[in-house]
Each structure stands twice: as structure tokens, then as C-alpha cells.
Image: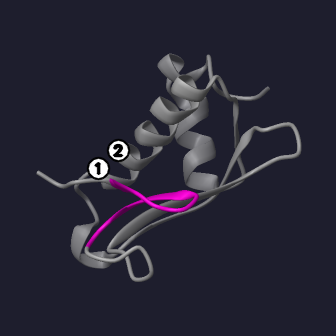
Amino acid sequence: MTTIKEGSQSFYVGESETNPDAEIGYTFSENGDIVIDHTVVSESLQGQGLAGKLVERVVEQARQDGRKIVPQCSYAKKKLEENSEYQDVLKQ
């Protein structure tokens, strides 16, 4: 099983936050929304659903913190819009 670690404004897989094997990065808007700006998965880990798991981890964090998500990353945007279970945290 792949372990998703919490970084500084990111969740990642790998030994190092500075050189991750997979990562979803975010910033915070002025009103505190989580703005997902990129999702990257190394070629060796692609096809395992890892990017979706990274999005899910940000959703969990948003729920814990009572925040909304603004997906600027095209992958995260598609994933959040298509999944009805994520609508509670998706900023409309």
C-alpha cells in the first residue's frame, strides 16, 4: 500500500517532499479556500489510481478544516466535479 504523507501545502508519495514520486499541491485563497494548483504522478506510478487518492486526501483535509476547494488543476477539477460525494467541498 502506498503511504500518502502530508507536506507543506501538499500531500505526496515518496521519500522526500522536495522530490516526490507523486504530489498534489495547493495554496490558500484570501478567504481560506484550498486552491489545488497541481497534481503530478511519476511515470512509474501512473495507472494505479494514485492521483485520485491524492485528491481524496485533500477532500478529507477540507472537510476536517471546514474549507472549500477551488480546483485550478485540470485533473483535480474533473475529479471533483464528476464525483457527487465531493460536492460538499467543491467551491461553486
Q: Residue at x 24, y 68 (%)?
A: 45
- Is residue 6 a member of the stretch shown in magenta? yes
Image position, residue 16 (x, y; %): 34, 77
Q: Residue at x 63, y 56 (%)?
A: 26
Q: Which residues are magenta?
A: 5-14
Image position, residue 46 (x, y; %): 28, 65
Q: Secondary structure at mark 2?
A: helix
State which quadrant residue 73 falls in. bottom right
Q: Which residue is mark 2?
A: 53
Q: Which residue is mark 1?
A: 49
Q: Secondary structure at mark 1?
A: loop
Q: Is residue 5 left or right of residue 11?
A: left
The tally of labels here is 2
Q: Is residue 54 left or right of residue 71?
A: left
Contact, CB < 8 Å: mark 2 with mark 1? yes
Image position, residue 66 (x, y; %): 64, 22
Please identify the quadrant where the C terminus is shown.
top right
**Amino acid type, residue under disc 1 in the picture:** Gly
**Amino acid type, residue under disc 2 in the picture:** Lys
- 74 relative to 45, above or below: above
- 59 relative to 22, above or below: above
How would you classify the magenta stretch by its main secondary structure?
strand
> In the drawing, what numbered circle is on residue 14?
none
Instruction: Spot the residue most to the bottom.
Output: 19
